[in-house]
Amino acid sequence: MKFLQFFQYVYLIFVVLFSYDAIEKWGAERNRAYMSLFFAALSLFMFFFRKRFRKKFQDRN
């Protein structure tokens, strides 16, 4: 179960990586930058979803 607690923070690493990628591509390839921003937003959503779901699961037990 400890591994799953750690794994939710991997999503934050993905947010940083995709945001950096979007900033780098913004001037040259705007469509790819939007794709990276979409994945950054999706990763941020998954972080908060996993965190809330884990707390809800722990409170149930």
Image (spheres, rainbow, N blue to C red):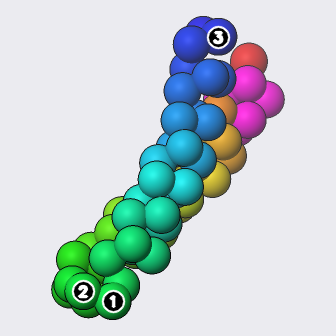
Q: Is residue 38 above or below residue 34?
A: above
Q: Which residue is mark 2?
A: 28
- Is residue 23 magenta-colored? no
Q: Is residue 19 above or below residue 26?
A: above
Please give the range of residues in magenta: 55-60
Q: Earlier in the sequence, mark 2 or mark 3?
A: 3
Identify the residue at image location x=53%, y=35%: 10
Q: Name which quarter of the figure residue 58 lies in.
A: top right
Secondary structure under the numbered disc 1 in the rendered image: loop
Disc 1 marks which amino acid?
Gly
Q: CA distance from mark 1 to mark 2?
A: 4 Å
Question: Are the residues flagged by discs 1 and 3 in contact, CB closer than 8 Å?
Answer: no
Q: Which mark is residue 27?
A: 1
Q: Is residue 44 left or right of residue 56?
A: left
**Of the pair 46 and 54, the residue shown nearer to us:** 46
Question: Mark 1 or 3, which is nearer the eye?
Answer: 1
Secondary structure under the numbered disc 2 in the rendered image: loop
Density class for disc 2 (Cα within 10 Å; few <14, some 14-19, many ≥20) is few
Q: Which residue is mark 3?
A: 2
